[in-house]
Image (cartoon, helix red, strand yellow):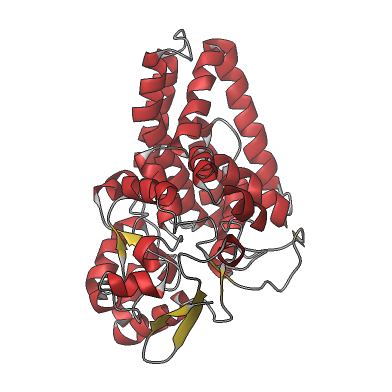
C-alpha cells in the first residue's frame, strides 16, 4: 500500500491504507480495510459534550406523514392516468422518470425515516405506516429494509453485517467502465438482492403483513386499472434507483471518490488529509428538498434519531465539526465521476473484518 488517509480529532486518529491510482489491478482490488471503529459514535460524543442542547433535536416529526400521504396519492393518481397508456411509450417513460422516479425515491427515503421511528412515537405505528408508504414501490420492501438498515448503522463497514457494502464479487467484475455503467443503471437490484446473500433476517409478522398488504393492493390495482398502472409503479421504482439525479445519493453517501480516494489526490487538490472523513460524505444541495435531507449524511449517522427537518439545525449548531469535512457538491456529478473516473471503483469503500460469517441468520435485532 502506498499511503495513508487519516481522520484525526483530539482523542483519536483513524487510519486507512490507500493504494496509488496507477497500481496494478491486483493491488486496486481491495477495499480500504481498517481495524478502527467507525467515527460517528466518537463525534456524537464530542458534539454532545460541547452542545448538550442537541439532545432536544431528537424525536419524531409528525408533519412528515402528511407529505408521505400526498406522495402516495400522487403516484396512485398518475398510475390511474396512465392505465391505458403503452408502457414503452415516450409519455409513459417521461412521467415515470420525471415524476414517478422522484416520488418513489422520496418514498424509499420516507421508509428510511420510518425505519428510525421518526414519524410516530410508537415503533409499531411506524412499521404499519411504512407498509402504507410502500404502496407505490409495487413490491414489498419496507419490512425488510428496517432491520438491514439498523445493521448498517450499528455495524458500519462490517463485511457481513453492513449489506450496503458491495461484495468482493461485485468489486472484481464491476470495477471497470462497463461494469460501473451496469451497476449505476441497475443499482436498485443490488441494494434489494444483495442483503439476502450476505445476512439473513428472521421473517416476522411485520414482513408477512407487508407482503400480504402489498400483494393485495397490487391485485386490486391490476383488477380495476390493469397491468399498465402497476407497471408505472415498477418502472418508477426501477428508475428511482438507476441513472436518476436523486439516485446519486446511494453512491455519494459512503464511496470514497475522486480527490478523497488517495492521499496523493487529497494533497493535489489542497485538502487537509487529516480532516478527510473516514467513510461518510454529506451533500447540502437543493435535491435535499426532494429527499428528506438525506444528503446530511454525516449528521444523520452521528444522530440517527434526529428527524430530517432538524438536521440543518444540527449542522448549524455543531458547524465546526461538519464544515471542515469534504462535501459532495452534486449527485448528478457523483454518478458521472463514479463511472468515468478510473480511480473510482466499487472497491472504494471502507471495510472492517466481521465477527460473524457470511450467511448468518440474525434472529433478534433491537429495532426500537
Residue 146 falls left or right of residue 337: right
Q: Quadrant of the C terminus?
A: bottom right
Q: Quadrant of the N terminus?
A: bottom right
In the image, residue 362 lies at what x, y percent? 73, 61
Q: Nearer the viewer, residue 127 or 139?
A: 139
Residue 327 falls left or right of residue 133: left
Regarding residue 308, the answer to whether it shows in the image is yes
Regarding residue 65, the answer to whether it shows in the image is no
Residue 269 falls left or right of residue 199: left
Q: Give the quadrant of residue 258.
A: bottom left
> What residue do we see at 40% from left, 78% from top?
44
In the image, residue 220 lies at what x, y percent? 59, 18
> What residue do we see at 44% from left, 87% from top?
13
Q: Give the quadrant of residue 67.
A: top left
> What residue do we see at 41% from left, 44% from top?
247
Looking at the picture, does residue 62 appear above or below residue 310? Answer: above
In the image, residue 128 lies at what x, y percent? 55, 44
Q: Nearer the viewer, residue 78 or 120?
A: 78
Amino acid at each position: 500500500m502506498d499511503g495513508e488517509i487519516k481522520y484525526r480529532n483530539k482523542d483519536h486518529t483513524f487510519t486507512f491504507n490507500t493504494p496509488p491510482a496507477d497500481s496494478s489491478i491486483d493491488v486496486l482490488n481491495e477495499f480500504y480495510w481498517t481495524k478502527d471503529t467507525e467515527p460517528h459514535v466518537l463525534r456524537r460524543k464530542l458534539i454532545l459534550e460541547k452542545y448538550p442542547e442537541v439532545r432536544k433535536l431528537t424525536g419524531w416529526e409528525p408533519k412528515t406523514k402528511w407529505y408521505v400521504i400526498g406522495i402516495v396519492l400522487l403516484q396512485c393518481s398518475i398510475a390511474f392516468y396512465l392505465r391505458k397508456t403503452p408502457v414503452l411509450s415516450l409519455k409513459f417513460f417521461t412521467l415515470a422518470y420525471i415524476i414517478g422516479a422522484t416520488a418513489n425515491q422520496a418514498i424509499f427515503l420516507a421508509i428510511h425515516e420510518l425505519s428510525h421511528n421518526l414519524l410516530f412515537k410508537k415503533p409499531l405505528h411506524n412499521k404499519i405506516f411504512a407498509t402504507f408508504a410502500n404502496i407505490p414501490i409495487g413490491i414489498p420492501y419496507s419490512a425488510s429494509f428496517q432491520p438491514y438498515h439498523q445493521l448498517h448503522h450499528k455495524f458500519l463497514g462490517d463485511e457481513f453485517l453492513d449489506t450496503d457494502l458491495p461484495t468482493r464479487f461485485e468489486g472484481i467484475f464491476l470495477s471497470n467502465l462497463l461494469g460501473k455503467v451496469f451497476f449505476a443503471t441497475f443499482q436498485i437490484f443490488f441494494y434489494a438482492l444483495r442483503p439476502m446473500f450476505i445476512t439473513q433476517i428472521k421473517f416476522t409478522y411485520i414482513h408477512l403483513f407487508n407482503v400480504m398488504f402489498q400483494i393485495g393492493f397490487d391485485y386490486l390495482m391490476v383488477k380495476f386499472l390493469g397491468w399498465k398502472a402497476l407497471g408505472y409503479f415498477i418502472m418508477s421504482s426501477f428508475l428511482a434507483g438507476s441513472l436518476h439525479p436523486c439516485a446519486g445519493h446511494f453512491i455519494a453517501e459512503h464511496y470514497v471518490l475522486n480527490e478523497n480516494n488517495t492521499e496523493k489526490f487529497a494533497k493535489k487538490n489542497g485538502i487537509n488529509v487529516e480532516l478527510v472523513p473516514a467513510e461518510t460524505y454529506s451533500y447540502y444541495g437543493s435535491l435535499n428538498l426532494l429527499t428528506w435531507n438525506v444528503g446530511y449524511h454525516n449528521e444523520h449517522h452521528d444522530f440517527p434519531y434526529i428527524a430530517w427537518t432538524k438536521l440543518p439545525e444540527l449542522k448549524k449548531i455543531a458547524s465546526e465539526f461538519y464544515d471542515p469535512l469534504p462535501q459532495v457538491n452534486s449527485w448528478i456529478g457523483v454518478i458521472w465521476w463514479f463511472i468515468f473516473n478510473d480511480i473510482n471503483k466499487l472497491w472504494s469503500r471502507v471495510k472492517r473484518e466481521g465477527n460473524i460469517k457470511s450467511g448468518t441468520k440474525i434472529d433478534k435485532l433491537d429495532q426500537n
